[in-house]
Image (cartoon, rainbow, N blue to C red):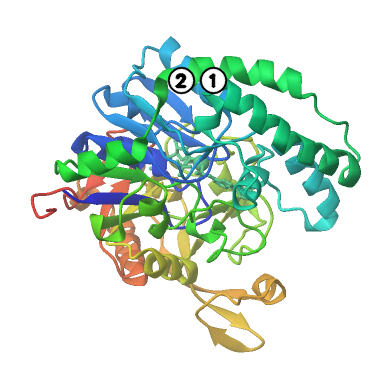
Amino acid sequence: MPAVVVIGGQWGDEGKGRVVDFHSRYCSVVARYSAGHNAGHTIVNERGKFALHLVPAGIFYGNKTCIIGHGLVIDPKSLLAEVAMLSERGIDTSRLLVSERAHLVMPWHRIIDLADERLRGAAAIGTTGTGTGPAFHDKVGRIGIRMADLIDRARFRERLREVLEYKNRVLTGLYGEAPLDPDAIEREYAEFGERLRPYVADTIAVVQAAHARGEMILLEGAQGSLLDIDSGTYPYVTSSVPASVAAGGGIGIGIGPTAIARVIGVYKAFQTRVGHGPMPTELHDSDGETLREGGGGAPDTREYGTTTGRPRRTGWFDGVLARYTARLNGVTSVALTRLDTLSGFERVKVCVAYELDDQRVTTLPATLEAALRVKPIYEELPGWQHDITHVRALGDLPTEARQYVRRIEQIVEAPIDMISVGPERTQAIVTRDVFGAALT
Ligand code: GDP
Ligand code: IMO
Ligand code: MG
């Protein structure tokens, strides 16, 4: 059976966790394949409201193999806190597996993340400060420490000293920070290693065996395509390798591109971004404030970061970027989230092109200077006033809301198969079964 990848089509926080929680029922393996605990996925289901950073959103079903793949960088402390939180709330984590090849976020990564941001000054990225970027930097720089090292005490002791000797020179010489003590780190991480040992496995073999048995695998993306290191709004991007786009799914978990049969692109019905960088449709007015405070939609869904609590920048749906990311990912099916938030606007806008130096352009320029200068060209559509959080059938949506959905579908050139009208698992309109019998 094939694998399905769920990706974010914007700047992250599109509702990927919510969509994965919904679709996990059809799958036997649910896996994260990239990023670290910079991701924050909110899930609201019959077990309550949860914020997950590393654990796949399939964990709530109890009978799914949930994998944290080798494409991730893992802060052991953060992972253990997440597992403890889930256990305390009665969620079974015994089917969680962590790749032995995944890299570790070490104490120096967070220090360097914060110090780099200070050094960048006005050009700061607005990172999550979780150490994720520097951990990927070390992975690619070949001075990373992996989960397999952590659970082998003698190996960890040796590798830690090798790496820390180098890192302490960087910390003291370049950043003016105090050197870190290898003994203290060794003691702390030895305990992490003992506690994580039961979860650590050769997850590539597990995923490949599941694939060979014909089981359905769901790959949960993190971030959004516009934050991708190669295709995103560089340098205001995240640093995950493999990429935050669908092509990274197979790489980060250990299956080939031919195994991936569907790509579900998750798009919010408007635009949000946390951190700095270009955002052509950003609103600085009361409409932007209304979107941030949850508009006329479900209560308690204000736009503030799941990981950092920062207010999210908000704006109208950017069709130029949505089409770009749909093509970039080979999106076959769209999940449109937070349509309920738009309730109450007299008119809603969709950006269909940009104006740049008196020209109409339909792509975002690569240079930062030009990307910051483009002016959105909007199409206006009539809004709708009713609360739609209780709607479960497309035909029951107000005509204007359906018109809006159809327009976005035309722009992204892929069918919208799921419309989410609230954060809860059941608050969805499903128009086509993405996991139907045809998926073989
Ligand atoms: P992710 O990182 O892509 O998983 O998204 P986040 O969890 O960071 O942010 C999405 C936010 O929107 C969360 O607070 C969700 O609970 C909320 N959410 C998801 N779908 C909907 C929806 O259809 N309507 C409303 N109002 N909120 C939603
Ligand atoms: P999920 O999976 C939204 C953003 C940060 C910053 C930039 C770089 O919840 O959608 P980093 O700490 O990764 O070096 O920060 O990327 N960012 C996210 N924004 N959602 C995310 O994940 C993000 N992960 C990173 O805000 O602008
Ligand atoms: Mg998020």
Q: Are marks 1 and 2 in contact (CB under 8 Å)?
A: yes
Q: Is residue 57 left or right of residue 76?
A: left
Quarter of the figure with residue 104: top right
The residue nearer to you, when weighing 205 against 106, is 205
Whether the residue carrying mark 2 lies under 8 Å from ligand 2 is answered with no
Count of marks, rendered view: 2
The residue at 80%/28% (across/down) is: 180
The residue nearer to you, when weighing 20 against 163, is 163
The location of residue 86, given as percent across then percent down, is: 43, 18
The residue nearer to you, when weighing 341 against 400, is 341
Tag 1: residue type?
A: Gly
The residue at 26%/43% (across/down) is: 208
Q: Is residue 103 left or right of residue 221?
A: right
According to the picture, the residue beneath numbered tag 2 turns out to be 197
The location of residue 150, given as percent across then percent down, is: 55, 26
Compared with 140, 375 (above or below) is: below
Kindly state the secondary structure of the residue where label 2 is placed.
Answer: helix
The location of residue 131, given as percent across then percent down, is: 67, 39
Compared with 51, 334 (above or below) is: below
Which residue reaches farthest left?
A: 437
The residue nearer to you, when weighing 130 against 426, is 130
Query: Mark 1, residues whose alpha carbon is within 10 Å: few (<14), some, or many (≥20)?
Result: many
According to the picture, the residue beneath numbered tag 1 turns out to be 193
Compared with 248, 308 (above or below) is: above
The location of residue 122, given as percent across then percent down, is: 83, 56
- Is residue 37 at all visible to an observer of this figure? yes
Kindly state the secondary structure of the residue where label 1 is placed.
Answer: helix
Tag 2: residue type?
A: Arg
Q: CA distance from mark 1 to mark 2?
A: 6 Å
Quarter of the figure with residue 214: top left
Quarter of the figure with residue 60: top left
